[in-house]
Amino acid sequence: MDLRIFTEPQQGASYDTLLTVAKATEDLGFDAFFRSDHYLKMGDVDGLPGPTDAWITLAGLARETKRIRLGTLMTAATFRLPGVLAIQVAQVDQMSGGRVELGLGAGWFEEEHKAYGIPFPKEKFGRLEEQLAIVTGLWETKLGDSFDFHGTYYDLTGSPALPKPAQARIPVLIGGHGATRTPKLTARYADEFNMPFASVEDSERQFGRVRAAVEAAGRGADELTYSNALVVCVGKDDQEVARRAAAIGREVAELKENGLAGTPAEVVEKIGRYAEIGSGRFYLQILDLSDLDHLELISAQVQSQLS
C-alpha cells in the first residue's frame, strides 16, 4: 500500500515551503511527492505568494531529494505543447535519476487560462488524446530514428525524439470520472488510473469500467495500478481532528464523508474499504503545508499500520 503526499500549491505556497514538505515526505517514509498543476487559487484563500510552475518545482525537487517519486496530478494539456512537455518531463526524469511520473489531464479551470492568457480550447479531450500519443511516442522512439505525427491538433515531422528519460518507461497516470472516453484512453496509454475525490462506491464503479476497457484493449487489467486521491485530516483525538479541519476551513463531518478524516484508526479502516475494491495507492491531499506534525502523525500511526 503506497501513501503519497499530494499538495495544492496554487492555494498559497512558495518553492521553499514545497521543498520543506517534500523533504519531510522523504524523511517520513512516504512513497512520493506530487503536486497539482494550476496557476490560480481556488476558493477563499489569498494564494500568496502566487503560483509556482509544476515542472520547474519538480526539477528543483529532483536535485534536492534522493528516494521519493515525483509527479503531477494532473498536468494540464492546455498549458504546454506536447513536444515541449516531453522534453521537460524527460529532463526532470534525468535530473532525478529516474523518479518521475506524469499525470496528464485535459485541463478544466477556465478562469486560470483567462488570468494568464492561456488559450482554453473547446475541444480539450481530443487534444489530450493526441498529447498522450505524442509524448509517449517521442519517448518510445528508438535512438537514431525519427518521430512523425499528423493529427487534428498537432503536427510533428522528423522529430529526433530527444532527450530520452532515465527510465525505460515513465509511468503515465490518467484519471477522472468519465464513463466512456476516460477508460478507453487509460487502457491505451496509462500505467495507473487515479480516481479523484470519490466515494468507495463511485470508485468501485469506475475501476470496473477501466478494468473492462483495459481487457478489451488486450491488456491484463492488473497491469495497471488503481489509486485514489483524497483530502486527509488526521488527529490523535477528536479535538485535534477538529483543529486541523478548522485550519483548512472544512467541517469534520464533511471531511469524514468525502475524505480520509478522523483518528488514525478511523482513517486506516476507511483506507481498508478502498483497498477492498482494488485501490492500492493513495494520494493524500495536504492542504495545510505548515503542519508538518500532521505528516509525522500519518507516518507513525497510519502508514505504519498499512505496511
Image (cartoon, rainbow, N blue to C red):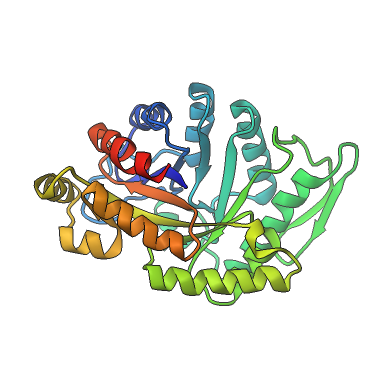
Q: Residue 199 location in percent, x, y? A: 36, 68
Q: Is residue 225 left or right of residue 277?
A: right
Q: Is residue 234 left or right of residue 188?
A: left
Is 104 placed above or below 207 here? above
Q: Residue 24 location in percent, x, y? A: 36, 29
Q: Is residue 109 visible?
A: no
The residue lying toward the viewer, choosing from 136 and 79, is: 136
Q: Residue 19 location in percent, x, y? A: 39, 28
Residue 301 lies in quadrant:
top left
Is 43 placed above or below 49 here? below
Q: How many marks?
A: 0
Q: Is residue 238 left or right of residue 217?
A: left
Going by the picture, which residue comes out furthest to the right?
A: 144
Name which residue lies at 32% across and 43% down: 302
Residue 113 lies in quadrant:
bottom left
Is 124 placed above or below 161 here? below
Q: Is residue 80 visible?
A: yes
Going by the picture, which residue comes out furthest to the left?
A: 239
Name which residue lies at 37% across and 56% down: 271
Name which residue lies at 73% across and 64% down: 219
* Quadrant assignment for the C terminus: top left
Q: Residue 263 location in percent, x, y? A: 21, 49
Is 213 placed above or below 156 here? below
Going by the picture, which residue comes out furthest to the bottom?
A: 180
Name which residue lies at 40% across and 45% down: 306
